[in-house]
Image (spheres, rainbow, N blue to C red):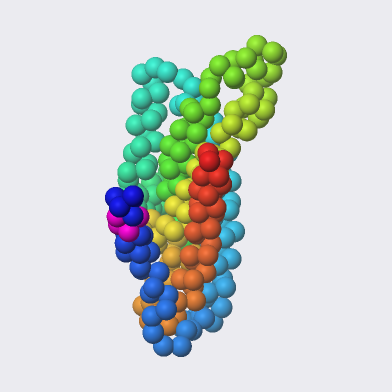
Amino acid sequence: MRSKWINRLALAAFAIALLYPLAGLAARVGPWRWDGGIPGSTGAAVRVSLALTALAIAIVIAIGTPVAWYLARHAGRDRMLWEAAVLISVLMPPLALGLLLSLAYGPASAIGGLLMRLGVPASNSATAFVVTQVYVSVGYYIVAARAAIAAVPRELEQTAALLGLAPAAVFRRVTFPLARLGLAAAVSIAWVRALGEFGAVIVTAYYPAGIPVQIWVNLQTAGMPAVMPLLVIFLLTALPLPWLVHLLAQAHDA
């Protein structure tokens, strides 16, 4: 009994230390300023981040789910190559990724030049914002989604196929219901990764400014009083989704 309470106290101390940075929200930094030095900037940054991040995540799900399913259900040496490619995108330092994207899709490149001729600028545009977010988050989604799909017993999928269901129907009626919590966790991880990206986005899409870039701009131009309102919004848009998914997963396993 004594060791049990010691463990609880140790965990409580750890949790307090871990969550202590949130006390910064109560710090005295002076009167909060909604827009910093640019009128309308905070509302515009929120709209940009929420709308474009939602679009980026939709693309990530559409592209990443088939890849995750393939990696989870196919064996062989080629799978190791594809997994290695996915891991490179996950391990890439954000600033390096932003610089590489700006070079690979810049006006001097073949793809960038073609996009410019088509009227789709590959830097400082909504397109650049979304593309960068897809690059920084799709690897995280695939890794988590692959684990969720791999946890579904393959025998159930094979039985459904023997009963005459097409592969898409097998995924919709068997795989997805059993993997939904894991897939939801994958989406939440990708959402937080994309929404919070700063290093790559500030290189490729300084404009239109999303929440992370606008926080940095406000900090540089008006200090912490202009950062705080946007910081609170940032936390409220980033934290609830993965937090709720984790709680649902815990309740499901209880």
In this view, 230 is above or below 5: below
Residue 30 visible: yes
Nearest the eye: 25 or 141: 25
Question: Which residue is painted at 50% across and 59% down in the image?
Answer: 238
Residue toward you, 55 or 156: 156
Q: In this rendering, does residue 116 appear at all?
A: no
Going by the image, does 84 lie left or right of 205? left
Image: 19 above or below 38: above
Q: Position of residue 108 (x, y in %)?
A: 38, 50
Residue at the location (58% across, 53% down)? Answer: 54
Q: Quadrant of residue 168?
A: top right
Magenta: main secondary structure equals helix
Q: Nearer the viewer, residue 192 or 212?
A: 192
Give how far across and how far down residue 122 sits, in percent.
Answer: 47, 53
Image x and y of residue 20, in percent: 35, 68
Relative side of 174 to 238, left or right: right
Q: Which residues are magenta?
A: 6-10
Q: Is residue 205 magenta?
A: no
Give the residue at x 35% y 60%.
12
